[in-house]
Amino acid sequence: MKKSALVVVVTAVITGCAANPVTYEGQRVRYIDNDRVAVEIERYCEWLGDVSGNQGNFFTADLTSERNMMEGARNDLRNEAGKLGATHVVVQSHSSVQPEYAIGSIGHNFTGSAFKCDSQEIKQARAEEA
């Protein structure tokens, strides 16, 4: 019994320290937080929906670095966009959850818009406008 409890605690500590991984679908999604590029994406690409990504909670916050929480939340955002078949996700906002009782933040949240872009269609649209 003690051995299985120890395994659960060690597993929680190890997984609590890591960023959320990027899924296969998420790897195919480009993360866009540049306003100039975002305008192009919004203009030429098909909007698929709004998505959000999060990492962190009260229990694992002290075990996870700020960097890993931010990276995990970005990865989660890309994963959610990937589920919609997106090629790009344009970040709309980022927030850090920091309650008064906590020393640091206990989580990060990103919201964005998922888009499907076809590079050939974009090139053609630009050429027609010129």
Image (tube, helix red, strand yellow):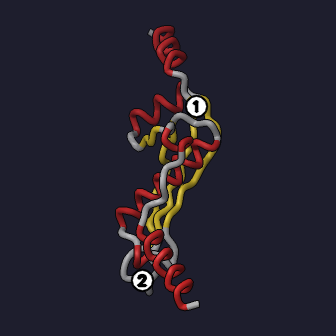
Residue 71 location (% of width, % of height): 41, 57
Residue 110 location (% of width, % of height): 50, 56
- The residue beneath circle 1 is 116
The front one of 44 and 130 is 44
Q: Is residue 9 visible?
A: yes
Residue at image x 52%, y 54%? Answer: 76
Say which amino acid is labelled 1.
Lys
Q: How many marks?
A: 2
Which mark is on residue 102? 2
Which mark is on residue 45? none
Q: Mark 2: which secondary structure?
A: loop
User: In the picture, residue 81 is in which quadrant?
Assistant: top right
Report crowding for label 1: few under 14, some 14 to 19, many 20 or more residues within 10 A (C-alpha).
many
User: In the picture, residue 25 is in which quadrant?
Assistant: top right
Q: Give the distance between the C-alpha atoms of the residues marked 2 and 1, in whole angstroms.
A: 39 Å
* Left or right of residue 33, residue 118 in this image: right
Say which amino acid is labelled 2.
Ala
* Left or right of residue 93, residue 86 in this image: right
Residue at image x 48%, y 54%? Answer: 21
Residue at image x 46%, y 33%? Answer: 39
Residue 43 location (% of width, % of height): 53, 27
Residue at image x 51%, y 11%? Answer: 124
Circle nearer the N terminus (2, 1): 2
Q: Is residue 93 visible?
A: no
Report crowding for label 2: few under 14, some 14 to 19, many 20 or more residues within 10 A (C-alpha).
few
Task: Determine the residue located farthest toward the bottom in the rendered image.
Answer: 2
Q: Mark 1: which secondary structure?
A: strand
